[in-house]
Image: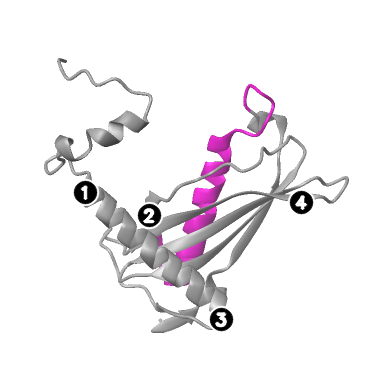
Amino acid sequence: MSQFKHSEQSHITISELMLPSHSNFSGKIHGGYILSLMDQIAFACAAKYSGFYAVTASVDKVDFLQPIEVGELVTMKAAVNFVGRSSMVIGVRVEAENITTGIKKHCNSSYFTMVARDNEGKSVAVPGLILSSINDVRRFVRSAHRQAEGKSRRAKFNSSSFKLEEHMEELNNYNVKLDLTH
């Protein structure tokens, strides 16, 4: 295995026509179905890059920007944006195309943290990432910051160290009523 690889060596693109069986009660494509496809492409991208089986460790925020219609062609693109020792952040972009008009729309993007595993299920080191463009550097640094912010957020709001008094005034900004008698 190479010690370092280019992100391009991880790129995966899949396309699928959206069928009525993929729709929810409002006639739009079910978000859960799209998330399942995103997880599949993130797995394929991580496995292709690392050369190992990969498992999903976390999924960063997913915003559904535009609905996907039955009959549209959905294309997902995935690439490794960041690597740790055994983890990889996979950026996934989802676009839908009206196949009769050719009009495309960006529907969502998300970031999947995948961990490479060996045959015994133990974490295994992945190749380093060669950053060969400003966009590669931007994506890498953005992922590094996102991971650091996540660790900080988890530590700050850990149930054993959370301090209610530090957040009492903040609660006034929300549509909540505090009732701690239960």
Q: Nearer the viewer, residue 83 or 169?
A: 169
**Pointer 2 residue:** 55
SS label for mark 4: strand
Q: Which of marks 1 and 3 is nearer the N terminus?
A: 3
Disc 3 on helix, strand or loop? loop
Residue type, numbered disc 2: Val
Name the residue at 39% across, 77% down.
Answer: 127
The circle drawn on residue 133 is: 3
Q: Name the residue under label 1.
A: 156
| Magenta-colored segment: predominant secondary structure | helix
Q: Distance between the residues labelled 1 and 4?
A: 41 Å
Measured from the top left, where is residue 53 in percent x and y? Answer: 40, 61
Between the C-alphas of marks 3 and 4, the distance is 26 Å
Using the image as rendered, state which of residue 119 and residue 147 is in the foreground.
147
Secondary structure of the residue carrying tag 1 is helix
Label 1, label 2: how far apart the Cα atoms are = 26 Å
Q: Residue 60 carries which label?
A: none
